[in-house]
Image (cartoon, rainbow, N blue to C red):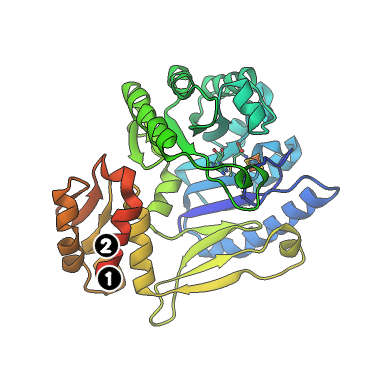
Amino acid sequence: MTSLYVHVPFCPTICPYCAFHAVRRTPGAVAAYLDRLRADARALAPRLAPLETLYFGGGTPSYLRERELVALLDLGLPLAEDAEVTLEANPGTLNRKRVELLKALGVNRLSIGVQSFQDPVLRALGRAHRRKGALRAVEEALAAGFRVSVDLILGLPGQDVEADLRTAARLGVGHVSAYTLIPEPGTPLGERTEPDPDREAEALAAARAILGEAGLVRYEVSNFARPGEEARHNRVYWRMAFWAALGPAAASHEPADAPGVYAVRRTNPPLFRWLAGEPPKEEAVPPLEHAKEALMMGLRTREGVDLGQLEARTGLPLKDRLLEAAAPLREAGWLEARGSRLAPTEAGLDRVHSLVLSLWEALS
Ligand SMILES: C[S@@+](CC[C@H](N)C(=O)[O-])C[C@H]1O[C@@H](n2cnc3c(N)ncnc32)[C@H](O)[C@@H]1O
Ligand code: SF4
């Protein structure tokens, strides 16, 4: 495996829309977390080739204190020379000193959770930062030479979507993740938010237009990048390649060595059960399930899925069947075939869910 995800579950406050595994700091918890992480990293190291991508996600990795960040970035794992090392950060946790420390520790890409540059929207989302802090954080990160991605949530009540997109474009970041709010069950905001598909579709159309004008190409349903600045780590997920994972609630996708099994997914328990030594949940992924997942993830991206490779990987005779099932979807202008590769068109990216369901039918 040449990709690793490390989950850092600590956050200064818990946002009312978030369903990721996130907890407040409690005395001793970060030290115990780092000890356990080091031990797990030592055990994992022999199974890793030099890492091409390393991703610290959360939670809020940038919320850790200086010496904790030093320990986090020094897990003793083999890194390729040009590895992409990403760290997720909240604007309120970034200042010049922190940005310089992260640079010195080997991080080269920051994914900054801005969500909006408008104070009333940030307040409604329960975010700790405001416009000024978000602008300063992005500018500091760019000035320090990081590749910067900005996360936005679009289509929120009262939000001037175009203004938020223009601000992100004007700042000169090379990558924007433009989501719409997922009303996560069990979260305070999720329980009281009704999705508004029209407003969301308008927001995504604005993202295509404004970010496109700034040279950021939509290369995945919610992700836009200047060519060359695509997220290499996330590509590993979209290609359903293999990756390792460390930390509470982190999930890996690893090669399997049992007959009839394509991969194994291992999901760690949440923080306190993980600290208590509870083992990960293991699920065997048979070849057909892998084929379905690879279609679901690959069709989210403009590069699509190489059906020839998928056939070879799974040993299932699926290429011709899928190309046949794709014919009406190609005629409708939603899919295109390039050699043995099947990929969504720009219009297809807006209806990936129904495209995937149609193709899955051909596999059942
Ligand atoms: C796991 S969060 C971690 C980043 C960082 N802690 C933060 O909040 O800025 C990564 C991104 O997921 C997105 N996100 C989280 N919950 C979401 C939701 N319910 N709907 C849409 N996007 C969400 C946000 O854009 C966020 O920046
Ligand atoms: S800061 Fe990020 S990870 Fe933490 S609760 Fe908020 S959205 Fe979730």
Query: Closer to the camera, 102 or 114?
Result: 114
Image check: 86 left or right of 304?
A: right
Q: In which quarter of the image is residue 99?
A: top right
Figure quadrant, ligand 1: top right
Which residue sits furthest bottom?
259
x, y percentage for residue 363? Answer: 27, 70
Residue at 41% over, 52% down: 236
Q: Does the residue labelled 2 lie within 8 Å of ligand 1?
A: no
Q: Say what amino acid the circle numbered 2 marks.
A: Leu
Few, some or many residues within 10 Å of mark 1 (<14, 14–19, 20+): some
Figure disc tally: 2
Q: Residue 359 carries which label?
A: 2
Few, some or many residues within 10 Å of mark 2 (<14, 14–19, 20+): many
Image check: 187 left or right of 230?
A: right
Residue at 73% over, 42% down: 68
- Depicted 157 relative to depicted 313: above or below: above
Circle 2 SS class? helix
Mark 1 sits on what residue? Answer: 363
Pointer 2 and pointer 1: residues touching (CB < 8 Å)? yes
Residue at 41% over, 77% down: 261
x, y percentage for residue 53? Answer: 47, 47
Circle 1 SS class? helix
Query: Closer to the camera, 120 or 136?
Result: 120
Q: Say what amino acid the circle numbered 1 marks.
A: Leu
x, y percentage for residue 196? Answer: 47, 39
- Distance in Å between CA atoms under marks 2 and 1: 7 Å
